[in-house]
Image (cartoon, grey):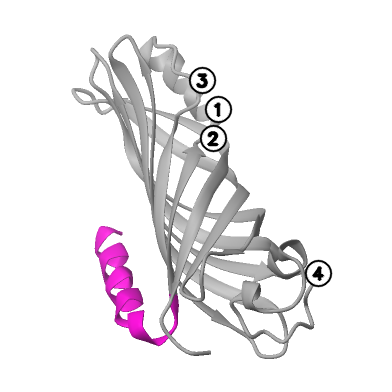
Amino acid sequence: MKNLFLSGAIILFSTYLFGQVGVSGAFRNFNAEEWRLAINEFSNEEFSTPTGFGIGIDYWFRIKNRRIEFLPELNYVSTSSTNVGNSLEHNQLGFHFNTNIYLFDLEGDCDCPTWSKSGNIFQKGFFVQISPGLANVSTKIKDENNTVADDLFFWEIGVGAGVDIGVSDFITITPLVKYYFSPNNELSFGTVDTTIKETANSDIKQLYAGIRIGFRFDDR
């Protein structure tokens, strides 16, 4: 998965001079409640829902004659919860096919960036985003019993909304909130010195609140 992330990043950067790329940072949480409760019982800890930050890189393109835009993204998320020096960690690599739908400007001229066109920022810049994706999460429980857990590959769907704000014809700033959901994922965990494993099934729910900065390198 790490090699996939690096390869994808190289591909995205190779398009650097031919469109728009973006980088993003966000507050994230990782709410897999049944996992957390089972891990707490197994490890005799009281971990809360892990929180942390995520970063991403994307490449922007669009369809003609409609304000529907695509931003395939590679991202990395690190969340954790600590309790008296012990920790529960979720480190995640993912790919999402972000799709922005500009509900109030679907038939706009698409001569982006939006701030160079007539109309107010909300009308031209507001969008809803749908983000189907795949991710690999590595879960680690570090405590006095050396409890560990396995990697897990899962799919998820994100739904959110944001507003494009133009700083210049070169830079766009986009605040964005999203909610990710992935149903019924099984995690196996145990201790380093035994082959005995416990399992727990849980939906994975993640909140995202962040900012994307888009850089434009062409004359479209």
Secondary structure beneath label 3: helix
Q: For the residues marked 3 and 2, what is the alpha-carbon distance in whole angstroms?
A: 11 Å
User: Quick check: marks 1 and 2 in contact, CB under 8 Å?
Assistant: yes
Task: State which mark lies toward you, 2 or 4.
Answer: 4
Q: For the residues marked 1 and 2, what is the alpha-carbon distance in whole angstroms?
A: 6 Å
Q: Is residue 54 left or right of residue 60?
A: left
Q: Residue at x 79, y 68 (%)?
A: 103
Task: State which mark lies toward you, 4 or 3.
Answer: 4
Dot 1 or dot 2: first in sequence order is: 1
Identify residue type, mark 4: Phe
Task: State which mark lies toward you, 3 or 2.
Answer: 3
Q: Position of residue 217 (x, y in %)?
A: 41, 82
Mark 4 lies on residue:
104
Secondary structure beneath label 4: loop
Mark 2 lies on residue:
201
Mark 3 lies on residue:
37
Q: Which residues are magenta?
A: 1-20
